[in-house]
Amino acid sequence: MKVIKRDGTTVDFDRTKIVVAIQKANEAVEPDCRVGQEQIDEIADYVMKKGRRRMLVEDIQDMVEQQIVALGRYELAKAYIIYRYVRSLARRQNTTDEDILDLLHNSNKEMAEENSNKDTTVASTQRDYIAGIVSRDLTRRILLPDKISKAHDDGIFHFHDSDYFVQPIFNCCLINIGDMLDNGTMMNGKLIETPKSFQVACTVATQIISCVASNQYGGQSVDISHLGKYLRKSKEKFTRKILEAAGGDIAPELLDKLVKERLYTELKNGVQTIQYQINTLMTTNGQSPFVTLFLYVRDGDPYIRENAMIVEEILRQRLEGIKNESGVYVTPAFPKLVYVLDKNNNLTGGEYDYLTKLAVQCSAKRMYPDYISAKKMRENYEGNVFSPMGCRSFLIPWKDENGNYKFEGRFNQGVVSINLPQIGLEVRGDMDKFWPEFDRRLELCREALMCRHNALKGVTSDVSPIHWQYGAIARLKKGETIDRLLYGGYSTLSLGYIGLYELTHLMTGKSHTTHEGKEFALKVMKHLKETATRWREESGIGFSLYGTPAESLCYRFARIDKERYGTVKDVTDKGYYTNSYHVDVREDIDAFSKFQFESQFQALSSGGCISYVEIPNMRHNLPALESLVKFIYDNIQYAEFNTKSDYCQVCGYDGEIIINDDLEWECPCCGNKDHKLMNVVRRTCGYLGENFWNEGKTKEIRSRVLHL
């Protein structure tokens, strides 16, 4: 028998612990209230003879308590309860020491792999993680109600970002960069005036991004179309200066040539400033700013030409990459890029199709940009097209006092994600029990989300002037509370969800890609959306449904459930759950069908949705990739491509690494031959992904390719 401890770890059952606990309780009561050693052994044997494969430590203690009461030893039962309580307090006194020491000794593998953008061996990152460990401890023991902490520990839901909950800061946002550039801002007590040129605007924008990132715990997004006017200012300045230098006597053709040359240099340097500053700056949380650039060439934009030039240069520089310490061009982690497909660039003869073709090349080599269909987004958001926040969640439409839609300068208060498969495991596929249990757990999620909301109530603008006083979110007065921005849908509270596929399998015995399974899955999604809407109407707070793109959470929920419910075929046996509404990765479905299928769930998940397909060997499949991007415009709101890119983990080389039929390979840059540190391309079929060892301990190469 295995015992699941409070921290989720599993140990062998040890009956002596029961014996010792009762003996300790015996010592605390009068002799005539005690039980003898024989009775103690009988109680321990009673638990042991249950013969369960797994038991929670709390369940064992409850059994012991019940057996003591059954013997009529009520004073002893009381003493045992007190003993349990005192032990609980002792555990709660300090739960941080081991985590901090493991971090400092670099022996905490989970923490080291938690965030690929943060190196846990670096002092500044360790400082942030130490603060996070303390925050999680305080959150679990003191700040959250016990039932919320227990529900999180039991995997009923996940209370996101508890490592920052001790502070009065929010999740992610859309920076109102236009207001900050046009009207000026303040940083570190210094006035930053409106830029007079494109390059200065780029420098100010990255300073804003860095300052914002240091005062919140989630990602941020910036619409680069606000930079177009500053590129035009630079053009006008160059034109004026060249005319002055020439005394007004210069041929139009020469003037145009000189202005273009200077303008392109300014454009290139400005975009390079954004890319390099974002990747070299380090915020107070020990990493580069988690920022997304929103690339949208809007028809009707008075600066559309300038913005098209900016988008092109951003894509070109991302395609090139950034040099690492070996001088090899590699893919930078930030900024993330989101590219909008609209009528003018959807590869059907639009004026800006050349930008989309460049974006596809960039996706093939550098994984980004992601793609948003303006057509589908307008259908889902009352005719609006706007950026997802850094965490890929979307704001719900909101209008100001003049009836105008507003998205920039808004934010997300926090996220709680429900574990859908666990409900199916708990009710054992009983549909009559499912819906009441579903609602009970949703109510727990609402209470947890309200903890997020209540933690921000009463917070004054002084806690982060860049956000609340100087334009990133608002321009409140010093000492003014942010409360009015927490209501009316101005900001959102996100109800996330994991594992719709597994839940459907548990309740119907089928995948949600089948007719019967889809009917149930859509019913679940509609119930989630209706619940969030009802909460919003009842409270005046912007609850929304968010398809959580949390890979690590998929593994955490599956691990917890496997410990509690054992190995369940097609559910806990995989070691992970599927993200949100996604099709299970093992299903034989082509990329086009996957996007088309998942699109119907995106329409219901208005607080956040992203779908992706994994495509092998993307850089050698550009025509197919262009076809898929063209398909996105008409069929799905938000999509991205994943691949196992071919690169050397020693030097960062990301050109092709070809293996021959004898399974031999070598990095042409540094000579590395260690297959564990290299992803490779298979010459015969073009498969680009991980190798594996079969049962015969011989190397094999997988060659399944999605149909494009």
Image (tube, grey):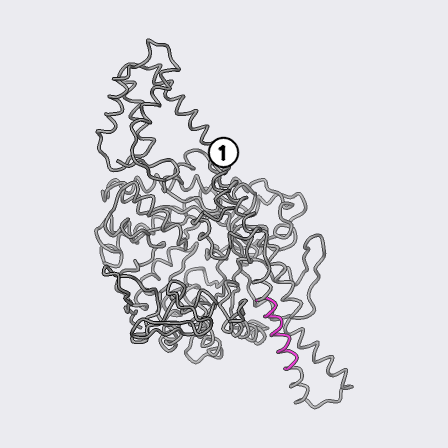
* Magenta-tinted stretch: 260-275
Query: Is residue 385 at all visible to an observer of this figure?
Result: yes
> For the point 38% across and 22% down, which residue is it?
81
Q: x, y percentage for residue 241? A: 74, 79
> For the point 37% across and 55% down, which residue is it?
604
Label count reads: 1
Q: Quadrant of the C terminus?
A: bottom left
Vertical arrangement, residue 279 with respect to residue 75, above or below: below
Query: Is residue 406 at all visible to an observer of this figure?
Result: no
State the residue lying farthest toward the right: 247
Indicate left or right for 525 with 127 as reference.
left
Vertical arrangement, residue 381 with respect to residue 285, above or below: below
| Residue type, mark 1 in image | Asn
Residue 261 included in the magenta stretch of the image: yes
Q: x, y percentage for residue 143? A: 50, 36
Q: x, y percentage for residue 465? A: 65, 50
Please tell me whether mark 1 sits on a helix, a strand or a loop: loop
Indicate left or right for 419 with 309 as reference.
left
Tag 1 residue: 94
Answer few, some or many: residues within 10 Å of disc 1's Cα (few below 14, many 20 plus, some between 14 and 19).
Answer: few
Residue 135 included in the magenta stretch of the image: no
